[in-house]
Each structure stands twice: as C-alpha cells, then as structure tokens.
Image (cartoon, rainbow, N blue to C red):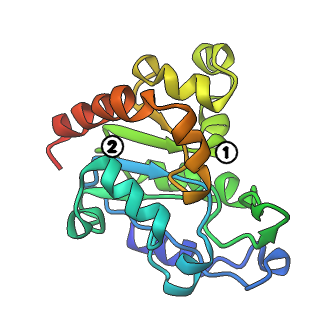
Amino acid sequence: MDLLLEQIRACKLCEPDLALGANPVVQAAPSAKLLIIGQAPGIKVHQSGIPWNDPSGNRLREWLQIDHERFYDPQHIAIMPMGFCYPGKGKSGDLPPRPECAEKWHQKLLDELPNIELILLIGQYAQKYYLKGSEWGERHQNLTDRVKHANSCPSPYFVLPHPSPRNRHWMQKNAWFESETLPLLRAQLNKLDI
C-alpha cells in the first residue's frame, strides 16, 4: 500500500492538461472500512494537499457526523477522488475530473483495500463510473433520482449529491434529502463502527 500511495502521489500522467500542475490527493490504509469517492480536489485542496479541506468537506463531515480527527484517519476512512488532481476552472465551476486517474489507479487502490464495507459515491461522476451497466444505475439515470433511491443502491455503494455550497439550490429543492437520506446513511455508518 505504501508504495502504491507513493506512486499515485508522484503521478504526472495528465500534468500537461492541468492549469496548476499535478498534486494528487489521496488517503488510504488497508484497514479502512469506509471509502469516499468524490469528484476531484478543488483549488483549496490542491493548495493544502488535504482531501475535503474546504467548505464542501465541512458539509460532508456534518452529513456523516464524523469529526475532523476521525475523518482524516486513513486507518478508518479511505479517500479516492475520480480525479486525483485539481482539474482547473471551467465556465460554471471546476472542470470535470480527468479520466486518466480512475483508469490507471482506482482498481489498483481498491485491490489494496480488502476491508471496505461501504463506498460513498459523491456526485454524478463517481456514480456514473461505478454504477454504469448495473440494473440499478440504468433504472436511476439522474443524480436526484439516484439519491432519492439511495436505500436500494447495490451494496457496498451509497450515493450522495456533492456537498458543495454551489448545490444550495438542490438542497432547498430536495428537502427530503436531510430528513430521509441522511438518516439512512448514518445508520449504515453506525454499523461500520468507525
């Protein structure tokens, strides 16, 4: 695992396409029971090198009801974004995650995480990649529908919207998320005893 993490952190595969250069962000240990797969680091995370070290991360930790110290303990929680580096700015937010990362690194990292019991797929990129071709994924085509039916998502996955402050409108429009989906998530997390 240590060698693999070194290789990921030294990766420069798509550096020519990254406005701020490569700075892969990942957290993992073989004992982790929870794996969080998000989109890609934002600019604040790129600068600090710490995953979810921004307002989105604050909201995610609130949703999970996991404190800062526990969240950053790789012995319990692994964090593997779809794109390990900040992809740059687009017209309405950050660019999509670079596709090279998932193709090159995800399965190698998953092979080193034998104790994962729950995988959080945060946002449409992670959900489309990991649920593509599944009957459930085909039945629930958009993010809102997937999150509304998170309780029936195939194990070991659980789907969430991105916790970005930019998604404020989605949260207001889908008030059921906090009252229905988050309690389901927290019940699953309680079973993990992390």
- Split into 4 quadrants, where in the image is the N terminus? bottom left
Residue nearest the viewer, comparing 42 with 58: 58
Residue 41 at x, y = what percent?
59, 68
Q: In which quarter of the image is residue 189?
A: top left
Pointer 1 local density, CA inside 10 Å: few below 14, some 14–19, many at least 20? many
The relative height of residue 113 versus residue 23 in the rendered view (above or below) is: above
For marks 2 and 1 on the same chain, the one whose residue lies earlier in the sequence:
2
Residue drawn at the location 27% of the way across and 47% of the way down: 33
Residue drawn at the location 46% of the way across and 32% of the way down: 175
Q: In which quarter of the image is residue 12?
A: bottom right
168 relative to 95 in the view: left or right: left
Residue at which label 1 appears: 125
131 relative to 89 in the view: left or right: left
Please give the label number shown on residue 36: none
Which kind of residue does numbered mark 1 sit on?
Tyr
Q: Are marks 2 and 1 in contact (CB under 8 Å)?
A: no
Q: Quadrant of residue 23?
A: bottom right
Residue 156 at x, y = what percent?
40, 31
Residue drawn at the location 67% of the way across and 73% of the way down: 86
Instruction: Look at the numbered disc 1 and give the secondary structure of its residue.
Output: helix
Which kind of residue does numbered mark 2 sit on?
Ile
Residue 91 at x, y = what percent?
85, 64
Instruction: Look at the numbered disc 2 and give the secondary structure of its residue.
Output: loop
How far separated are the C-alphas under marks 2 and 1?
20 Å
Residue at the farthest left position? 193
Please give the label number shown on residue 116: 2
